[in-house]
Amino acid sequence: MDPVLASAIFLFGLAFGSFLNVCIYRLPLGRSVVTPRSACPKCKQPIAFYDNLPVLSWLILGGRCRHCKTRISPRYLMIELLTGLLFLACYWYFGLTLSTLKYCTLAFLLLGLIFTDAETKLLPDKMTLPGLALGLVFSLLVPVNDLASQFLPGVVNLPFSGDVSVRVLSLLDSLLGAVLGASFIYGAGAVYLRWRGMEGMGFGDVKLMAMVGAFLGMKLTIFTIFTASLAGSLFGLTTVFVVWLKRTHRFMKRLANAQAARRRGWQSAQVVYRNYQMPFGVFLGSMALIAFFFGNQFLHWYGGLW
Ligand SMILES: [Zn+2]
């Protein structure tokens, strides 16, 4: 890793993270991310460029607005740092290649979607749809090298060869990934709606997984969906369990009857379970981030087990 280039890419990531903060705040509100200039949400004072430097300004101002001293969430700082670190990780992993550009783009989109979903339970079309288009375009530049590229050339006689064939097959892999990701989530959403009588996954999740599929291809899309379901279920179960423990503890003090306290605690936990709405986009997005760094190694190891 070239240290000068690495620092430049990290700083570049911080700047993109700063822009991502604007997107996360404005896109769910349907506002433009270009104009007007950033202003303090409390006192409406425009933020000067020297108070808008990624990370530094937040630290210098102690996480407060210069004018009205309103607290500014440390989330802003965190997103800038995370974007910078992910850009750096892409460079470290893929070197100075088009792959780095592709995965920096995906990391940027995923981080934005994860935090928007966590905060507003929305996955804005203005992130997922351009993301889907970018994923398809990138497949022409960086081979997806998934099932179609691996198996089709041996099965059918392609009317083209060499570089053209690599690109066409890569685009096909990207398209198949998008279709698989979208239809899987759409189907799972329909099953979930029947089973629990409420919407667990919306069209936002469908479009998110179309985007992820276009970037990663079919295998890693399946990896993303399965690990995200696992992580989401574990998170849900842990939440219910923690509620049960806490409520039981509280009823113990009030009721002085252990059995009744446990029963009341369990009733509370059931209410939480019934009303629990998982921000599934958070898990899908996080697992997609893990998938492009470690997914192939995992699939390789998993395939070895059989
Ligand atoms: Zn202010």
Image: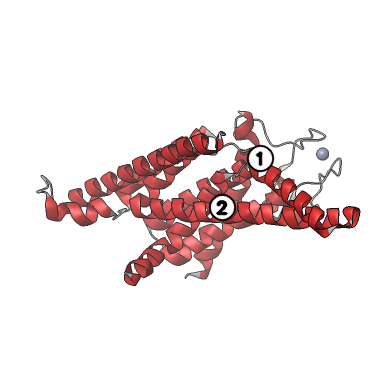
The image position of residue 184, as x and y in percent, is 40, 42
Residue tagged 2: 233
Residue type at tag 2: Ser
Residue 60 can be seen, yes or no:
no
Cβ at disc 1 under 8 Å from ligand 1: no
Residue tagged 1: 275
Q: How many marks?
A: 2
> Could you say which is closer to the camera, residue 7 or residue 235?
235
Above or below, 245 against 212 in this view is below
Q: Residue furthest top?
A: 30
Residue 74 can be seen, yes or no:
yes
The image position of residue 185, as x and y in percent, is 44, 41
Q: Is residue 168 left or right of residue 17?
A: left
In three-dimensional space, the C-alpha distance between marks 2 and 1, rounded to whole angstroms, equals: 14 Å
Quadrant position of residue 98: bottom left
Q: Residue at x 39, y 46 (%)?
A: 213
The image position of residue 57, as x and y in percent, is 74, 52
Where's ligand 1: which quadrant? top right
Task: Compare marks 2 and 1 and give the one earlier in the sequence.
Answer: 2
Q: How is the image coloured?
A: secondary structure
Residue type at tag 1: Asn
